[in-house]
Image (spheres, rainbow, N blue to C red):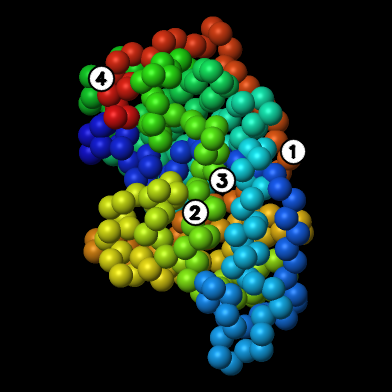
Amino acid sequence: MSVRRLGAGLVAAALITPALAACASGTGTAGSTPSPTVTASGTASPSGAPVAGDAKQALLDSTKEISNGNFRFTLAGAGSTAEGLVHQPSQSAAMKVAIGGPSSDLAMKLDVIHFKPDSWVKLELTGPTADSLPVIKQLNLGKYQHLDQNRIKGNRSLGFDFEKVDPAGSAVLTQGITEVRSTGTGAYAGTIDVTKAAEAGSLNAATIAALGTQAKTVPFTAKVDPQGRLSELVLQLPAAGQTAAQEVKMTYSDYGAATAAQKPPADQVVEAPAELYSLFN
């Protein structure tokens, strides 16, 4: 695998970028008795009585708090993990990403910090492939590399858009729900059309294409907190082509209670070289 391919894999590996959000106190409480399955329009299934409240609407409402941009999040899938925070009041955000493990030919760790108008990334590349690449020596590994905003604009791996603050695009994903039922207090399950998940940032286009018609009915589970805010969304992707079945999980927490990201110490900062931008383009 080339360094360039791995860079592109940040989003491709279901890793999503630091695009985040949070705050719109929704109150959605589900009863302890599971509701009948409802379609996306909110109609009760033929075997059930009229649904008291629309389960899909509860999930749509659960994502509104995200847009206020004050929360912590985690993302995991396809052998990759990410965790971070968004703090709109200070116009800052941070994310730590890990792709691949100790046995990988090429593994990557990223520590990305945004504090408007600046951004920095600390990069770690390990594995036999990394050791054999001359370009690695030019990337100032171990230092925070200050990024030129003009060169990362629109880059979902390094950039950050404070107008679109959700790293997983849960608002877009929940709009794709095709069937949903309550499975307990604050818990839901059903199917979701993930064909727009690339737009959301949750999956890459190649993964969605490989799913074929299965992309229209991907099983999911979701949880909301006592205030009706989304706390967990899990997609169960079926096997497709050469790719085994896998789980993509996103969580949200600390709504309204996240803290500002911390700028890196000045003595740990260098300007990013051209090779770094090439890696992620």
In the rendered image, the vertical position of residue 130 relative to residue 140, given as above or below: below
Q: Position of residue 190 (x, y in %)?
A: 52, 72
The three-letter code of the residue at mark 3 reads: Thr
Q: Which residue carries the number 3 mark?
A: 74
Q: Nearer the viewer, mark 1 or mark 2?
A: 2
For residue 257, the mark is 1
**Left or right position of 232 against 2:** right
Identify which residue, 243 or 217, lies in the foreground.
Answer: 217
Q: Nearer the viewer, mark 4 or mark 3?
A: 3
Q: Position of residue 154 (x, y in %)?
A: 39, 31
Residue located at (54% from left, 73% from top): 41
Q: Which residue carries the number 2 mark?
A: 172
In the rendered image, the vertical position of residue 250 relative to residue 241, given as above or below: above
The three-letter code of the residue at mark 4 reads: Val
Q: Quadrant of residue 94?
A: top right
Report helix, strand or loop for mark 4: helix
